[in-house]
Amino acid sequence: MFFETTLLGSVELDVTVKLLFAALAGGLIGLEREKHGRPAGLRTNLLVAVGSCVMVIVSEAFYTKYGMFDAQSALRIDPSRVAAQIVTGVGFLGAGVILKEGSSVRGLTTAASLWTVSGLGMAFGLGFFSLGAIATLLVLISLAFLKKLDPIIKKDRFLTLAVTATQREGLLEELQSIFAERKLLVSDISSHADLVNNELFYQMVITQQQKRVGHELTSAIRQLEGIRKIHYH
């Protein structure tokens, strides 16, 4: 640990090694995120790891400097409070990279990587090098290799479909018939009527699709009477 044993008797060398390991772990994970065009990439992950490492080292330094004060004194030191605030603070940082578009949510993996990187920085800051190294390896494996299993794993896809058409009876039933023919399920639907332009608008979330069906649905829906606009994502 930091002040119990030091590298070659040098506190500065001990601190430098911890910071370098934290920067390496954060940089490797950040590089993987950067290659995939994520908003929190190399620099962000590296800074989170190094910052977490610095704060853990500082919390140890507080305890070492003021640890002689007992529970009866006015000054009480709890090094774990700094680590607890790191977890909370990075949680807010991760929330900033999560984007919601309709029924789809992006950025959850990047937010989780930031949260994990802060833990890696804390591990190296405490001098727990084996924990930091093993965790870094596991994170890199999960980010780089588990993604390749996506085509193999069967999972439902979600499609948000918006249809604008001339106001008439029976349009919704015809749309539902198209979905039923393809064994698709409408999990959510909203609609409104434009009385000025005499238009109907439907927005639906389609599930139970094992392949991308947006183009196929567009081709089928455009054959219906009165269709003016079709949008999906």
Image (cartoon, rainbow, N blue to C red):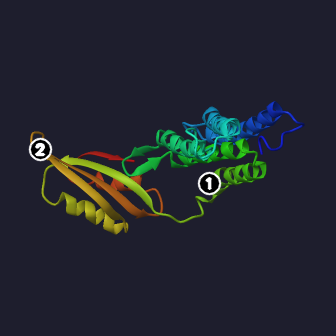
Crowd rating for badge 1 (residues with CA inside 10 Å; few <14, some 14–19, many 20+): few
Which residue is denoted by mark 1 in the rendering? 147
Mark 1 secondary-structure assignment:
helix
> In which quadrant is the N terminus drawn?
top right
Q: Where is 210 relative to 37, above or below?
A: below
- Left or right of 142 in this view: 86: left
Which residue is denoted by mark 2 in the rendering? 198
Amino acid at circle 1: Lys
Mark 2 secondary-structure assignment:
loop
Asked which quadrant contains residue 54, the reply is top right
Amino acid at circle 2: Asn
Q: Where is 215 relative to 62, above or below?
A: below
Could you say which is closer to the camera, residue 218 or residue 94? 94
From the top left corner, tell me how far across and down residue 63 is, in percent.
Answer: 67, 40
Label 2, label 1: how far apart the Cα atoms are = 47 Å
Residue 195 in view (yes/no)? yes
- Left or right of 172 in this view: 206: right
Residue at x 59% of width, y 47% of height: 71
